[in-house]
Image (cartoon, rainbow, N blue to C red):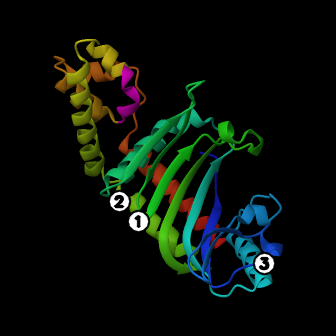
Amino acid sequence: MNNIFGIDTIEIVANKRLINAYNSLFVPTHYLDSVRTKYVMNPDFINGGITVEKYSDYMSLIGEALQVAGIEAPVIRRIDFRVDNFVDEYEKHYKLHKFMILCLAMSYHNIQSYESYDPVTQDILCIRAQGKYWEAEYYNKLKQEPKSGIKSRFEMRAKAGSYHVGDERRYFDLYSERLIKITSKQYLLNVAEYLNDCLNDKWEQEKKNISKRGFLEKYSDNIFMKEQAIGLCNMLGYKDPKQTASKLDIKYISHKELSLYVNELITLGDRFFES
């Protein structure tokens, strides 16, 4: 999928207040008490705006910055892993990411999910889910930052952790476990069933003003698997749900496609940490 993996930002807690001379490398975000401060560090920014593609380079840059500032053993409270695509348009992989993010969200309780649009052009800007310990977001990087040259970005954010600089791999391994958890075929079918229950409720609210086919077209972006489409068509009362589902102009996401992408994400992360 032409993806490049990296670390976008880290948020550290340091037992030190930095003088203004270091503000270009460390952005203070919150003073926890008289000494401890949260700082945000962006490896690419420290590297003069050049993308950091190797973990060894990341460690050199972060280590040197911490040494210059005199910060010892900071704790990483948050780390944002990024996967950038410079080739494919955002829309090409939008539905795959939306399905994956919804699957992640539904595997945890009290997770908030969002989708945003440009109110003028109606372009989709992002789909995201967030909880206390993690976030996932797929967004139209080219739309938001045209000069970046990046078409789309998927971010995996680990939060509220207590690992130190040098332990970034442990955060990624925890995130990988979350991704692997959603690749079970039965789990995907359970998610599809829940989505269909929600869509059926929508149908009951709207059926007086829309045809069955019009309803399916309207909510096609929330119909992911062919098995889901068959189940929904059955709910709507079609005589031959399988045939109807096969004729719908809907991009389906298969269990195999999602599993392959999850494996790709994990492989990209493994390669980064080995570099």
Which residue is nearer to you in this view: 62 or 53? 62
Mark 2 burial class by Cα count in 10 Å: few <14, some 14-19, many 20+:
few
- The image position of residue 94, as x and y in percent, is 51, 37
Quadrant location, the C terminus? bottom right
- Location of mark 3 (residue): 19
Query: In the figure, 30 relative to 87: above or below?
Result: below
* Mark sitting earlier along the chain (1/3): 3
- Location of mark 2 (residue): 181
| Residue 166 seen in the current view | no
Query: In the figure, 249 relative to 274: above or below?
Result: above
Which residue is nearer to you in this view: 108 or 35? 35
C-alpha span from label 1 to label 2: 6 Å
Magenta range is 218-224
Residue at figure coordinates x 66%, y 36% from the top left: 143
83 with respect to 196 (left or right): right
- The image position of residue 99, as x and y in percent, is 40, 42
Q: Are marks 2 and 3 in contact (CB under 8 Å)?
A: no
- Location of mark 1 (residue): 177
Residue at figure coordinates x 59%, y 37% from the top left: 90
Mark 3 burial class by Cα count in 10 Å: few <14, some 14-19, many 20+:
few
Nearest to the eye among marks 2 and 3: give it.
Answer: 3
- The image position of residue 179, as x and y in percent, is 42, 58
Q: Is disc 3 placed on a helix, strand or loop?
A: loop
Which residue is nearer to you in this view: 162 or 50? 162
Is residue 240 within the magenta segment? no
Q: Are marks 1 and 3 in contact (CB under 8 Å)?
A: no
User: What amino acid type should be assigned to the residue bearing mark 1?
Assistant: Glu
User: What amino acid type should be assigned to the residue bearing mark 3?
Assistant: Ile
Residue at figure coordinates x 71%, y 74% from the top left: 56
